[in-house]
Amino acid sequence: MQIGIVGLGRMGGNIGRRLMRAGHQCVVYDHNPQATDTLAKEGATGASDLGDLVAKLDAPRVVWLMLPAGKITEDTLTDLQRILKADDVVIDGGNSFYKDDIRRAAQLREIGVHYVDVGTSGGVWGLERGYCMMIGGDVDVVKRIDPILSTLAPGRGDVPATPNRDGRDPRVENGYMHTGPVGSGHFVKMVHNGIEYGLMQAYAEGFHILRHKDLAELPEAERYTLDLADVAEVWRRGSVVSSWLLDLTAGALAQDGQLEHFSTEVADSGEGRWTIEAAIEEAVPAQVLSAALYTRFRSRDAESFPERMLSAMRFGFGGHKEFPVK
Amino acid sequence: MQIGIVGLGRMGGNIGRRLMRAGHQCVVYDHNPQATDTLAKEGATGASDLGDLVAKLDAPRVVWLMLPAGKITEDTLTDLQRILKADDVVIDGGNSFYKDDIRRAAQLREIGVHYVDVGTSGGVWGLERGYCMMIGGDVDVVKRIDPILSTLAPGRGDVPATPNRDGRDPRVENGYMHTGPVGSGHFVKMVHNGIEYGLMQAYAEGFHILRHKDLAELPEAERYTLDLADVAEVWRRGSVVSSWLLDLTAGALAQDGQLEHFSTEVADSGEGRWTIEAAIEEAVPAQVLSAALYTRFRSRDAESFPERMLSAMRFGFGGHKEFPVK
Amino acid sequence: MQIGIVGLGRMGGNIGRRLMRAGHQCVVYDHNPQATDTLAKEGATGASDLGDLVAKLDAPRVVWLMLPAGKITEDTLTDLQRILKADDVVIDGGNSFYKDDIRRAAQLREIGVHYVDVGTSGGVWGLERGYCMMIGGDVDVVKRIDPILSTLAPGRGDVPATPNRDGRDPRVENGYMHTGPVGSGHFVKMVHNGIEYGLMQAYAEGFHILRHKDLAELPEAERYTLDLADVAEVWRRGSVVSSWLLDLTAGALAQDGQLEHFSTEVADSGEGRWTIEAAIEEAVPAQVLSAALYTRFRSRDAESFPERMLSAMRFGFGGHKEFPVK
Amino acid sequence: MQIGIVGLGRMGGNIGRRLMRAGHQCVVYDHNPQATDTLAKEGATGASDLGDLVAKLDAPRVVWLMLPAGKITEDTLTDLQRILKADDVVIDGGNSFYKDDIRRAAQLREIGVHYVDVGTSGGVWGLERGYCMMIGGDVDVVKRIDPILSTLAPGRGDVPATPNRDGRDPRVENGYMHTGPVGSGHFVKMVHNGIEYGLMQAYAEGFHILRHKDLAELPEAERYTLDLADVAEVWRRGSVVSSWLLDLTAGALAQDGQLEHFSTEVADSGEGRWTIEAAIEEAVPAQVLSAALYTRFRSRDAESFPERMLSAMRFGFGGHKEFPVK
């Protein structure tokens, strides 16, 4: 089917490519004309601006936004609100906050435009592997765009089937799920990323313990110098902790067991923070997911004020008699 | 090759079966004669006690213990120490504490008996999938038992190869690793289990947040009733959090989305605790792995003393004037 | 000076009493007429409704709200907005969210009414000990109500002076602080409560460890049956962990070392949650404060879904072969 | 009464001084002769070595060790074991591990020497304020040294009495407690320090949140520049979080609100680690105490390996296609 794509970064561009490979017709626009040209050369119809993109699509239109969450997505939706018509569909495939989805959908509903939020996992691997998608929106709108969704999804592949799924929605086993009303797609994707933080941190802590098993402070008989690349690799085979993140870790360690070229400052995107806020709203304890987020915060703190405060207290009760309490 | 197996529970029995299927000759013993008989009927040579088992093995012998960590393993090793001869090999395939391995190996070394510790992951799936093994011991002893290890290991299977591994130990890609000196096999397996706790807890917290998104306390527009079985299933397909533990979770949820028949009290084995102790010995922060362990402790605490202490304090500063501080 | 007080619960009533004892004139109103009567009998001027209260105050008026945070405070402010006049002052002495303060102050500013937020600590002890207050608002408005604030504050008492405070704001040493613009008073009080959660949890965990030192699982020589009431009491004398919360704990334990009559479910007020949200907004790691909050969440979770999920996974990899992954 | 003191550092020297001020007779020894001389000039009897110290004491002797935990204490006890006689008493007033106490007491018991462990809190303030002491040992031995203990203890001072303590051991209200058998004194002191870590971290996190409330990333209307020295000071007056640690914090901040001269690397002594190990042995969740310890570990980690591992994973799924998983 025909679709408009706004935002042709790494994700948006590949989404277009995967759709075109399957015969879909893509009208594309990026604020950077070179990005638009690149995809046009690969078979897409380039558009010079949002208006041009909308003009080149047949009504009722389907426009997929693949933009950074926040101001850019917000501004683009404001612009689209002026030029789209009743029964058109806007899909936000980025990492928007689900409460923003709910607000935006209500605004667009007033002019008859449908809104669908798609949480998209798969990163740079999606072009080949397909994108795991969590989709929020009205039932019939989600159905209308199914040709797009089923093409983007990974499909069953050679992932072994889970038993007892007879009679369940077959889309799920193809890697895309209609999670519920507007916002629910991004909500589920948000929690997905929260879990991702926790998984990553569990591996990082474990490998840290393995790495420091050779510390000079330990009794000599209890010191081991472990090959972390091999440990990661062997765990990929039949162990309980095998996962895709472990696959990636094994790949990184095989290249450089010291990981010397990687940053010690770890960014966090909105989803990790929003996940904790959701946990707090629901009164759900989220110790592991919080700890994972805080580790990233800590990695970027060059000031170490709380640590200096601990030192000050230690000095206060154990050090010199700087000021008399009594 | 020929091997003696002591302990024919779920793990030990299947290890014997997997070895026999590949043509190895197994002499087996379990303190429960029925278990011995069962395996004998499947082709093993049954032994009536440890002495009988040792007598039925050709020197130099190889004896694999697959017993619960702790007293039983300890007692069996004490008995074996009396009847084994120089150059025999004892393998502890259970979940022993690595510091016990170091102590035991030193004792056996005095009479010329070799000790190998094998951390074995794979659980009930090992018979078919093979066992991921982490092996501590002397280089030539580990080589001597390679026919056994390579049979038990999963092999390369269809797990995609990690690039940049040329020139590395090929055993690792077959799912078994010689990790270093005695104790290192169980040490690496211990950390594996510590990570396992962290991964499991990350999923549990995330699904808890998903599940409570329908709470009546939340604003109505922000409530979703999510199908957790479908969420787990869709994440198996191309998402960043795909893993074997997620496969198992998807399976459990497909059977019963409420997980009603599962215990609210979660056991912990020694490895989770030892992992934290190792982290503390190395001064490695292990926030996530600790939190995962503590959740299990908490699940078994029926007394709730600390919570009552919090209530008492709250009552003290906010409630009635029970006692005058001043 | 003259002041109106709305809300005569435990806090509001005692604030009126402490002010009247010092000669201030209080016009009071509570939606429960009995509460109004009680204070009227103690010397206050009772009002029959908000309008009556405003009518009985001389312009420019000062009205102190001491109401539960949320809807009641919000509604009362909406009502007051209609009847107050330019240059009147509204003080919110409750536990409102600081972002609500900012919004409300902006609304009131439009009609020339000043808004002051006062975070008030001291609980049921405030009548005698005075109230520790953190105050947000314009400099001259805060000065205008200083007679009220200085009366409510604890004063220097016999708390030892901190050195190096020459030239600093003397109000602080009397127990009240002008923290900055509107909202900052409640913000500082909010963090105060967040810290309070952390301190309480630290004591609760420590006493839990002391209490279980008599567990039958421990080696007999390492078991102690400790008198927790005595431990709390001895720590009040010269130890590093002495605090007012410890005083309260010692009092509770002296009454009942088992704390049997206290609830195992621990409530949390908004401040603990907002503190974590503030930490996340600022990218500040708040591991301890989060853990303290989560313990309270956990104490009220009767369902134990995440624990059952852990059990399900354990069953999946270690139990019976319920479903084939391959 | 007469007492020998071994180890005249900041703690040992002041313990001697406090005892001499009360008329006790001290025979003192430090491996640094200058330390011995200093105290001799203040009225003590100096000893040139352990043998000399023992020779100068009347039987049955009482010897107080105030040495760093670990090897020095161990070696000194080994030496004393050779020269002390039946019915002599050795007191370990340092921060020894309670399991070491149990072992040592058993060894000394064989030659009839009594062992008492005293956990001592109070730091550099003890000389004036007295020492809060937790004491493990046999009932009659602890009674025998009561003149020493009651002198070192803070006494009732002006700390308000806790109600409902009639009929309880009066020593406790004087600041020293016989906690139980050998080891229990150091065990209670160990948990005291564990709690101390938690309390300190709760304050540090809270002040960190206050400090960063002026971040440029925050909405301008929600930014506050808070005077942390004043906040700490005002909380000392009638607030729920008042404590001695807060007194010290207020003192440090009044000197320098940036705490610039304090180390960003925070040491941890054995007690914090042992507390977590005890929690694990007892299956007690100790989330807050662990988090406090881990913050210190993290403060000293210059390598940031786990953070680099997180970056490597992020690169793996979000960055360039460095290696094909499939």
Image (cartoon, coloured by chain):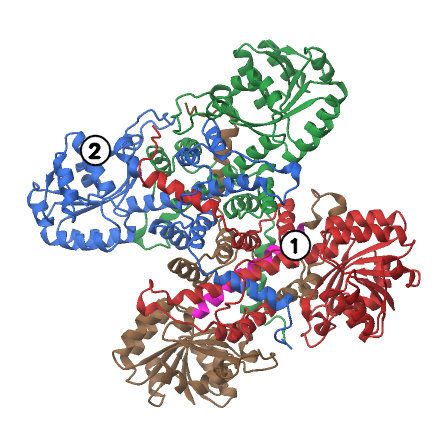
Chain colours: A brown, B red, C blue, D green
Magenta stretch prevailing secondary structure: helix
Q: Is residue C63 visible?
A: no
Q: Which residue is nearer to you in this view: D289 or B138? A: D289
Where is the C terminus of chain A found, in terms of image quarters? top left
Name the amino acid type tagged 2: Arg
Query: Which residue is depicted at the point 12% across and 45% down?
Result: C87
Q: Position of residue D324 (x, y in %)?
A: 63, 74
Query: Which residue is depicted at the point 67% across and 61% down?
Result: A256
Segment colored magenta: A188-212
The residue carrying mark 1 is B271
Q: Position of residue A151 (x, y in %)?
A: 50, 85
Name the amino acid type tagged 1: Glu
**Residue A189 part of the magenta segment:** yes
Q: Position of residue B120 (x, y in %)?
A: 72, 62
The residue carrying mark 2 is C18
Secondary structure of residue under mark 2: helix
Image position of A281 with respect to A143: above or below: above
Where residue C81 is drawn, which disc sits there?
Answer: none
Quadrant of the rendered structure where residue B63 is?
bottom right
- Given the image, what chain letter belongs to the residue carrying mark 2? C
